[in-house]
Image (cartoon, rainbow, N blue to C red):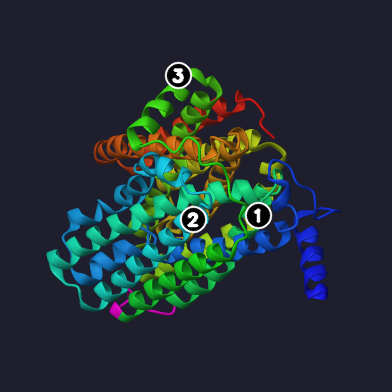
Amino acid sequence: MAAPEISQSRLYEWLTGDEDSRMCRDIPDEACDEQPRNFFLHLVASLGNKLADELSSARLVLPWLMGVIGAPLWMVSLLVPIREAGALLPQLFVAGFIRLRPERKWAWVVGGLLQAAAAALLALLALFGAGAVGGGLVLAVLVALSLARGLSSIATKDVLGKTISKQRRGTLMGWSGSVAGAVTLLAGAVLMLFEERPGELALAVLLGVAALGWALNALCAARITETPGAVEGGDNAWDSIRLGLRLLREDRAFLHFNVSRALLLASALALPYVALLGQQQSGTQLGGLGVLIVVSGIAGMVASPVWGKRADASSRRVMRDAGAGAAACCLLGATFVWLPGAWSQTVWPYALVYALLVIVHAGVRLGRKTYVVDMAGSDRRALYVALSNSVTGVLMLLVGGAVGALAQWLGTPALLVVLALMALAASASASRLPEVE
């Protein structure tokens, strides 16, 4: 077994740039020897999770599912808020429960298995669902999937903080995003071979692969070697809420981070509107979906390792630069609509903007994830992550509703200008955050 272990350590050192795989900061001493093995388990687990997320995307894939089964149009508008807020809002309520467990990886495993089961049910609905009943069942399954996603999210970050050293976490997330982007690219290329839109079988296959991705995620999580942690502070949900609100009042840096994160929602909110512009201008159906999935995969391959390395150096600067990039992408998308020319009547200009915005959004996600994990001490990491995600979930519902109303009133191009201003405010706010690396 010595040779594989040496090879694994060398590969780990090459991927992370370490000269010594025992470089361990902010993790227990017992976890240091297991770090290379845990690194690769985290990597494969994240690959399964990211691939499953892309193939069940509420911004691209699930709207097509609703169209195939003939669900009412109003149900489509509920997909993104349910997927995002449903995953974020309950996290504060389960933080105390997870804190009572010395090994938090089993909460991650349960969340992964529940997401796999939900994706399998969505695959069955693609084959057998129809009309309003089918659409209602899709929304109900999506609620369950989102709640399970929230459970996995908080447990994953806590286990990451216990098993992977500081200045290696962003690199890990960057490489996982790159590999997942490559696999997603293949899925989008296959979709482009269809002529009009994916049929029931094509969607069922996509969602079935998503179920396998989450099953792989749960399997890898179960094999991670986790040092049992302290169980103090595992209060009930309301105690966690009171403590969380007190932290927001007393920890000004944490409050400032959450303000910046809220403003950075501009990148997530802009993505479906850029995709909508591409569909409206080109008149394509499945072709547009395939192109957007392909460019999303390419963008993920290009963006994630670069952002990951930069996040390990300064996650604050990553959030600042990503906010400025989001503003530029929003303005570029709006400009394409207003410019004359037949070239703007195709999906490709908007696919370019979508790809750039995916790259920027990867920076937003990596920056804020690395920042909150590094900012929080080991004793309160789970609570900080859960509180930040719960606050963002509330704001997603409020800001998402306001953005929807603005889109109806102003139109998509003008809305993108508003989101650009929001992203610029995010960049300015992030630039004043303290360094935590």
Where does the image place residue 406, in percent across and percent down from the top left? 28, 36
Residue indicated by mark 2? 349
The answer to whether residue 134 is seen in the rendering is yes
Q: Residue furthest left?
A: 132
Residue indicated by mark 1? 172
User: Of circles 1 and 2, which is in front?
Assistant: 1
Q: Residues within 10 Å of mark 3 (few under 14, many from 20)?
A: few
Q: Looking at the picture, which amino acid does disc 3 mark?
A: Arg
Q: Earlier in the sequence, mark 1 or mark 2?
A: 1
In-image side of 96 versus 316 (left or right)? left
Q: Quadrant of the N terminus?
A: bottom right
As helix, strand or loop, the secondary structure at mark 3 comes to: helix
Q: Which mark is residue 249?
A: 3
User: Of circles 2 and 3, which is in front?
Assistant: 3
Q: Which residues are magenta?
A: 192-200
Q: Residue furthest right?
A: 19
User: Of circles 1 and 3, which is in front?
Assistant: 3
- As drawn, 289 above or below 409: below
The answer to whether residue 346 is seen in the rendering is no
In-image side of 22 versus 226 (left or right)? right
Mark 1 and mark 2: Cα distance apart in space: 32 Å
Where does the image place residue 182, in percent across and percent down from the top left? 59, 68
Q: Looking at the picture, which amino acid does disc 2 mark?
A: Pro
Q: Nearer the viewer, residue 97 or 397?
A: 97
Instruction: Indicate yes or no whether the magenta region holds residue 199.
Output: yes
Q: Quadrant of the C terminus?
A: top right
